[in-house]
Image: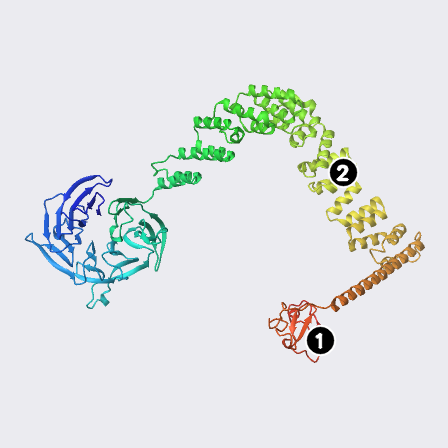
Amino acid sequence: MTVHEKFLALGTHYGKVYLLDVQGNITQKVEISPVKINQISLDEGGEHMGICSEDGKVQVFGLYSGEEFHETFDCPIKIVAVHPQFVRSHCKQFVTGGKKLLLYEKTWMNRWKPSVLHEGEGNIRNVKWRGHLIAWANNMGVKILDMISKQRITNVPRDDISLRPDMYPCSLCWKDNLTLIIGWGTSVKICSVKERHASEMRDLPSRYVEIIFQFDTEFYISGLAPLCDQLVVLSYVKEVSEKTEMECCARPRLDIIQPLPESCEEISSDALTVRGFQENECRDYHLEHSEGESLFYIISPRDIVVAKERDQDDHIDWLLEKKKYEEALMAAEISQKTIKKHRILDIGLAYINHLVEKGEYDLAARKCQKILGKSTELWEFEVYKFKEIGQLKAISRYLPRRDPILKPLIYEMVLHEFLESDYEGFAMLIKEWPGDLYNNAIIVQVVVDHLKKDPQNRTLLRTLAELYTYDQRYGKALEIYLTLRHKDVFQLIHKHNLFSSIRDKIVLLMDFDSEIDRVVEELENRPELQHVYLHKLFKRDHHKGQRYHEKQISLYAEYDRPNLLPFLRDSTHCPLETALEICQQRNFVEETVYLLSRMGNSRSALKMIMEELYDVDKAIEFAKEQDDGELWEDLILYSIDKPPFITGLLNNIGTHVDPILLIHRIKEGMEIPNLRDSLVKILQDYNLQILLREGCKKILVADSLSLLKKMHRTQMKGVRVDEENICESCLSPILPSDASKSFSVTVFHCRHMFHKECLPIPSTMSPLQFCNICSAKHRGPGSAILEMKK
């Protein structure tokens, strides 16, 4: 059989040639010979056909013209090939092959002139003509002839000469005008015809052949064809029968193979079921292909199998068969312009049904959004289906709320389902769904009926307030929110401008945390209540009303001075300059002192304590808090001419500043109250410090001695040395394999072990020996704790 993109030509064992369309329907029958047809050849245009048969007959004729050639040879003619451009007048050529390869050319007198191209190497088994190159196979190998130069440019020898060439024929196929694919036995070679460089010509042909790929297959090759950069290989397979344990013929295989430089990779493999495969031989199978449509024809004695590349519809079929619906849906969406067999909607609905059958209701409902799109009919059908299986809750989250909008009954049915079993879910839907999706009055009445059974249910009350809001019955909604002390009351007031109706209840709103700005604004005319509200807010959260901290300074100064200083201490948002100005205006000394110290002006703060408060104890306490030497110096200078201040300093300075500094500055003759008692206290404090130091020293010495004894006891303990230990220098086992031999081992406190001979000799300056590893790592060298000798 030979294949053209327009039709097929099939020769039979009984000498008939049938022309078939690409669907396999017979369009014409030609009787050639009473014996079998060996080969059929067509030109590129499909207008001329060459036929040879077992009785030596050769015919070349036009399918649409009267042009015809007949010749009968005295031997079987196995092959025939017409020139690819036979339709042209200067290309009236064809070759035949039996024991010789003959070229027939039409002369100017319309006579056919034969010439021998090759002979002497057995029967010609196969021939393929492409462009100006003819490739043929005989018993010895494959040859290629350049028709321009009439020179043979290569000889590719047969690899396995043990195989009979008539039983395992050679398969030839041109991939393009310069690439020949050869399959013979189990060997595949891909050859490239190349131009020879002018400098290499000499007496050589202008072209040469290079084998670019060569590999062996697992089975015998009956045919091959190109598929992009891959190969389609028809293989003859033998296997061992499990019953008889004898070799028998198996079903032929059609493989797609990716050629590699010295091997190949199998991409796919299919076993083909053809009639009578048990009796077939390798020569009984052939592979032809149509380049235009990537169709492949497997010819056997009784069947012709057509193979084609799988398209996206085939891929989707396979995915659906494997129940990989999500991948099938994705593949259909990507290829929606090319698929012909499937619809995205049908795949999606099948996917939803599959998920429902598996019990994955939430995922099935989620997929409805994408698959059902804007079809109200499909949505309503799916909702009722979910209702039948008791899974309305699963689909509720994904129901469309705009474009499209379903019938109100659908939404009311879902709300009723939640109201019967899940108040929180019901409340969530009421909050999320627009109020125009369902009949609000019906839902309000149902909620009121449920509240009769459970009047204190906060979830139902809150939901009823939202329903009243949708229905513009704001008074009832506000009443419920105030009863619940719910934060949404401010949203309701603000949105619907209800401030005038709640002025008498404004103090009640101080219990709410939201809408702070609005509450502060409403209390602007009642600053004392405004202060109470902000004070409570500050106590609850120091940062919540931070934008009002500046305002609170004046409110605290006016209505609540005792809490002003704690407020200044705790607030990190009030402006210090403003606070200082207010406190200085009102002569708040303690607050001013705190603010000066916080702003870094400790000297002014100390001066104010001493001049305004005249309180030496507070001044000393302030100096202790600041822990600043210069501040102590200022305190001493200020106090040096004030005997009461000196007494206070002498009683408290001992633990922070050297008392001698103060005593040296006291003027002679100054009368200082309780001087004797102050000096005695200084001495007593000093003696107490000495006693504390000596006590600490004794404790430290006792602890050190205890730890030293513990370390000594630890280091005196034995160290286990066994065959698992190694010498850290030579890395060999620390113990010899022969226990009878003498040995010497040194073990350090760090548990590193060495053979005696592997340690460096200690210097005469320091007889002590240290671990090399720990010394190198600066971890504190360990001295030897044990020497083992035997």
Task: Please name the residue shown 16% across and 62% down the image.
Answer: 119
User: Can residue 404 be seen?
Assistant: no
| Cα gap from disc 1 to disc 2, whole angstroms | 72 Å
**Residue 694, x across and y down, in percent:** 85, 62
Q: In this image, 339 relative to 407: left or right?
A: left
Looking at the image, the residue that sits furthest to the left is: 109
**Residue 731, x across and y down, in percent:** 60, 71
Task: Please name the residue shown 48% across and 27% down the image.
Answer: 383
Give SS at disc 2. helix
Q: Which residue is mark 1?
A: 768
Give SS at disc 1. loop
Front residue of 423 and 122? 122
**Residue 166, x across and y down, in percent:** 22, 56
- The crowd level at tag 1 (other Cα within 10 Å; few <14, some 14-19, many 20+) is few
Residue type pointed to by label 1:
Leu
Q: Which residue is mark 2?
A: 564
Front residue of 243 and 319? 243
Residue type pointed to by label 2:
Leu
**Residue 391, x across and y down, in percent:** 52, 29
Question: Where is residue 717, by image quadrant?
Answer: bottom right
